[in-house]
Amino acid sequence: MNLILLDPNDLTVDGHVCITDPRRLTHLRDVHRSTPGALLTVGVQGGNMGKALLKELSAERAYFQLETLDEPPPPPLPVHLVLALPRPRMLARTLEHVTALGVKEITLLHTKRVEKSYWQSPELRAEKIHQHLLLGLEQARDTQLPTVTLSKGFRPFLEQQLPDLLGNRRGLVAHPGMPDPCPRNISEPTLLLVGPEGGFIAWEVEQLLTAGCEGMHLGPRILRVETAVTALLSRLF
Amino acid sequence: MNLILLDPNDLTVDGHVCITDPRRLTHLRDVHRSTPGALLTVGVQGGNMGKALLKELSAERAYFQLETLDEPPPPPLPVHLVLALPRPRMLARTLEHVTALGVKEITLLHTKRVEKSYWQSPELRAEKIHQHLLLGLEQARDTQLPTVTLSKGFRPFLEQQLPDLLGNRRGLVAHPGMPDPCPRNISEPTLLLVGPEGGFIAWEVEQLLTAGCEGMHLGPRILRVETAVTALLSRLF
């Protein structure tokens, strides 16, 4: 938690901050080892970041005086990430990685090689996803929550969502064996599609290319999804 | 396990392969769901890769006929990675990530903000480290094991190891707040130094810069060590 991320409800009308949830209280006490008088980095969800002076820390609440709140969050990456749904533990870590890296739009997609049972995982509950996004923001010092969309059918995605997503974005499908390497240091709005462990099937790649995406690869090595996504984002932007 | 990594002892004199360890047998049976007749990708530690035909799979052994063994492993990254020792679970994952990405020389370093207790972790036992390196190679389809060196004092590293390491390498220290961004798409031999959670202390950075390293940063976001290392390697090479 490099940033104490504040819900608008944590702000009092007179410019103070009052935190009462056990997760952040425990973190302040046991990890930060904060004591009254400490000046901590805070940020308001969806808003600015700044500094707050810790006035009081008890088992029930942390009470801060807000000193500044004038620093904008870091810029987002210009990417909508479409990720074949990974297995639950990989999903949790990947959501944290990509949120920390600055991704703001995420679609989790069903493809042929996604195990159907993954869609029943408790990790897909809205509050679990939200928790991982918060951890990513707190890690990276960011305040802008990503949106996460679940897309449980490949064909409906292809027919109903992909054309709009490609309307003003460059579509890039990461797939081993494509002729072109991953582009570097681009800045245009991008739709990045990443397959599951085992990859997209050939038919899926064909459909994505026909719809206007470009294929590209990261080299001869086969990477786990969480490694590949971080490597792709870091090379692209 | 995208590659069945063979120890030279797994090879019989008449060109067959015999595997008897439970880890690989279980994986062949339960994850690959291999049956006799399957043609699988194999590689010999430190040597070439190729195909082997599964002839027999029992609880005691898997027996293959080696078909080809003429594909060289993918090229390594031209980097020696010096990583402040991360906490044990992060270390395990990071070793797998960087091995999969093609790093062949790793030094784990003590710095001021590394918790001393981490050096007592069972994850640092040679056989545990070896296991994570094997998993990284099997994931990426590579056969060349990285070397891992433990460097338990910052000053001895600085005085006795760093000058040699910098003799024929470009030294790069990844540290938030440095003026220059991480270079992109370089190919020269590189020494990449990455601090612990919380970063190098100012004195450590000064010493590294004085010794001839260049400082650089990955942007305003603070990343976890495992995310940062993957992002750095992917952007640099």
Image (cartoon, coloured by chain):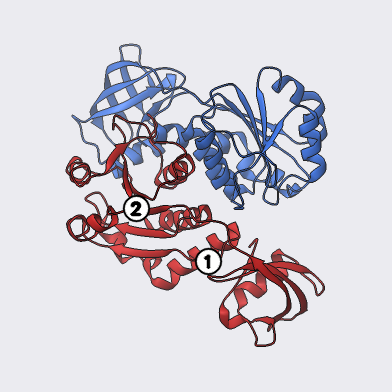
Chain colours: A red, B blue
For the N terminus of chain A, the image quarter is: bottom right
Amino acid type, label 2: Leu
- Chain under callout 1: A
Q: In this view, does B38 lie to the left or right of B91?
A: left
B170 vs A218: above or below: above
The answer to whether residue B132 is visible is: no
Q: Which of A100 and B103 is in front in this view?
A: A100
Q: Which residue shows up at 69% across the image and 82% down it?
A: A15
Closer-to-camera residue (B181/B160): B181
Please say if A147 is above or below A113.
below
Which amino acid lies under the numbered mark 1 shown in the image of this protein? Leu
Q: Which residue is drawn at 51% across and 52% down?
A: A101
Which element carries disc 2, helix, strand or loop?
A: strand
Give the distance between the C-alpha atoms of the residues marked 2 and 1, in whole angstroms: 19 Å
Residue A225 position, x and y percent, is 39, 46
Side of B181 where A87 appears, left or right: left
Residue under label 1: A134
Q: Residue A83 carries which label?
A: 2
